[in-house]
Image: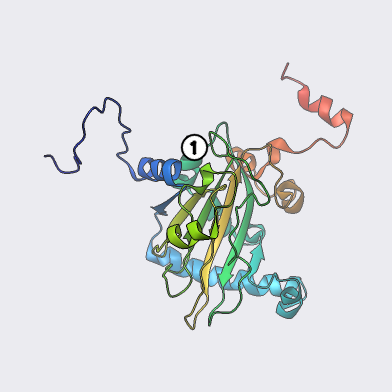
Amino acid sequence: MQPGNSGRYGVIEQTISNTEVEQACESIRHLGYGIIDGGYEPAWLASFSEVFDRALERHYSEHGGSESLRAIDEHNTIRLPLAHEPMFLELAANGRILEICDRLVSGYVVLNQQNGIINPPRAERYNQGAWHRDLPYQHFVSSRPLAINALFCLDPFTIENGATRVLPASHRQEAFPSDCFVEAQAATIAAPAGSFIILDCMMFHSGGVNTTEKPRRAVNHVYSIPLIRQQIDLPGALGEHFVTDGKLRKLLGYDVRTPGSVADYLAGRIGKS
C-alpha cells in the first residue's frame, strides 16, 4: 500500500486535496472547520502583538474606558481595529484566507466584520463562551457557505487557555443539537500562534474557559456574501478615501453600498445594462 493510501473498495470518485488551502476547504466542507497557517514570520507576530495591545488601549480610551465597556459586556472586544491600525487591514486581506473564501463561497465576499477578541484569564466570564453561530439566530442550512469565519490565533490556542470548541458538522443541521450530543461530540481545536481557525459560519462553536494567568488574544473575521449586512457599515465608518486599491475596496464593501435614493440607484445602473 502506498503512503497515504487508506485502502478502498468500489470507489470511483475521490476528492483531491494536495495543498494546505485545498485540505482546509475539504475539512470545512465535511466537518465545518479547518486550520491553516497564516504564513507570518515570528517578527511580524511580535510586532502585531504590540499593535493589538495598543488597539485595545485606544478602544478603551475612545469609548469611555474599560469599566464603561464592561457595563455593556464589550470590554473583551475591539470593534473594527483595522480603522486605525494598518496591520489589522493586512491581516484581513490574508491571501490564504481569501483563497479559501473564493473556493467555498459562491460569487465574492465582503468583510462583514473584524473584531479583536480577548478570552480573559482566571476563568473569568467570557461573552463568547456560549454556543452560537456567527450568523446568530438563524436555523437553516445552505448547500454552499454564506459566510466564512476566520479566527486568527495571536496567542497559541490550548485547552488550558480556552481554545475554541466546535460541534463537528453542525453547519449541516438546522437545529442546535441535544445536550447529550453536545456533551459527547464537542471537540476542542488547539492551534499554534499565527494560524487561522476557519469555520463555516453556520457551525456551532464557543470559546473555552481560560484557566491560565494570561489573556488569550485572537482576531475574528467574518467574510460573507454581499447580500448579508455588515456588522458595521465599513465604507461609512472608514470614509470614502480610506483605501484606493480596487481589490481592498471591494473586500471592504465599497462596491455594494445601499443606494440612499432612487437617483443613487439609477446612477449605479449606468453602464450595467
Q: Secondary structure at mark 1?
A: helix
Task: Tell me where residue 171 appears, x and y as whole percent.
Answer: 53, 45
**Residue nearest the viewer, comparing 110 with 268:** 110
Residue under numbered circle 1: 104
As drawn, is 207 to the left or to the right of 76? left
Task: Tell me where residue 196 appears, x and y as whole percent.
Answer: 45, 56
Task: Tell me where residue 265 appears, x and y as whole percent.
Answer: 82, 29
Task: State whether residue 27 is above or below residue 180.
Answer: above
Which residue is at 48% across, 51% downward? 198
Residue projecting furthest to the left: 1
Which residue is at 71% across, 20% downward? 272
Q: Quadrant of the N terminus?
A: top left
Q: Quadrant of the C terminus?
A: top right
Label 1 amino acid?
A: Leu
Res 215 visible? yes
Quadrant hosting residue 16: top left
**Residue nearest the viewer, comparing 8 with 260:** 8
Task: Tell me where residue 129 appears, x and y as whole percent.
Answer: 58, 67
Task: State whether residue 249 is above or below residue 40.
Answer: above
